[in-house]
Amino acid sequence: MNYWIIRGRPTENKFDEMLIPNRDGNWRTARPPKEWHNGDRLFFWASSPIKAIIGFGELGKFAKEKNKEGDIRFEVRYLTNVFGNPVRIEELRKHSLTHQASFLKIGPTQTVMPLTQQQGEALYHLVISKNPGHSIWKDIPPESIFRELISQEQNSLAKKVFNPRNLKDARKRVMASIVRRQGQPQFRQELIQAYNSQCAITGYNAVDALEAAHIIQYLGPNTNHVTNGLLLRADIHVLFDLHLIAVNSSNMTVIISPSLENTSYSVLNRSSLLLPNNKHLRPNKKALDKHRKEAGL
């Protein structure tokens, strides 16, 4: 799933008349991106003098060749009306993720501009924080939940929840934290290949957001085995490490903590784990059972 900025000029585009949910529209660009796909997510940007994100949309079909005017025509589906509270350029430039987005730097002639996945999700949260009625992309990890999970992890470490007399346990948790942040390229690459570049729990396939999660936490190189790992989206990795998600090894389905039942993660409960085609690369059931026991699920 890709995210794009579609820029229009308020002097030429009557946005209030154009942006009507589920209405289709036609646009054109002289510089079509190479990596766009039908169904990609769009943010509509009103250029000067408004300079703000004003709506959501979805990319439709697009021509393969340029027309006589040298443009590529493409279809969009508008998903919202013009936002009551647009996200203006001043807010975007202050945000730690969106301030480096390419559309804030590219000249006024370009129509379609890319966003990274992080920028797209951050921009979405910025919009719905001001326009909660437009929360339409339910699969994007809730920002509030992610912040809460990180806070829980930090508080647990600060309170030294593990027994300080157990140096092996202490070392295990410290090393797990280091590995989780730095990553281990070979272990991760092996999991990416085994799981066909998809999150084992959500099916999410944006590789940059996928991490190598240890089932039994890192205790040295010997634990970097594919069968002791799961390829997980970053937020799912956090939930797994915090023992808020586990796996029922008898039928390879997902179990979530009761604390997640009233969140958007509830849809994952009892869903089937995506498994490698190669049976020898599938997760070790004893390791999954140990993790589930530790989680109390």
Image: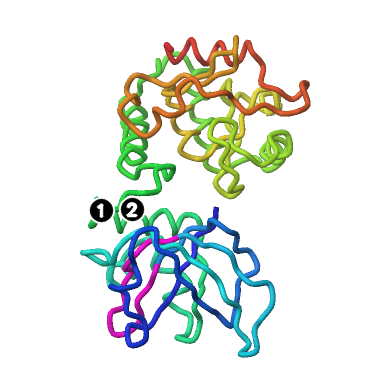
Which residue is depicted at the point 60% across and 68% down?
Answer: 62
* Amino acid at dot 1: Ser
Question: Hey, which residue is sitting farthest front in the picture?
Answer: 23
| Residue 91, percent from left and from top | 28, 67
Which residue is depicted at the point 41% across and 23% down?
Answer: 244
Please name whichever residue, 58 or 125, is drawn nearer the observer in this view of the structure.
Answer: 58
Q: Residues within 10 Å of mark 1 (few under 14, many from 20)?
A: some
Which residue is depicted at the point 52% across and 16% down?
Answer: 291
The magenta span reads 44-57
Left or right of 61: which side holds 193? right
Read off the residue under disc 1: 129
The correct choice, above or below, for 132 with respect to 62 in the image is: above
Quadrant assignment, res 219: top right
* Amino acid at dot 2: His
Quadrant assignment, res 218: top right
- Mark 2 and mark 1 in contact? Answer it, CB < 8 Å: yes
Specify whether residue 291 is painted magenta: no
Which residue is depicted at the point 40% across and 79% down?
Answer: 8
Q: How is the image coloured?
A: rainbow
Left or right of 196: which side holds 60? left
Left or right of 120: which side holds 55? left
Read off the residue under disc 2: 125
Q: CA distance from mark 2 to mark 1?
A: 6 Å
| Residue 172, percent from left and from top | 53, 24
Specify whether residue 49 is painted magenta: yes
| Residue 10, percent from left and from top | 32, 83
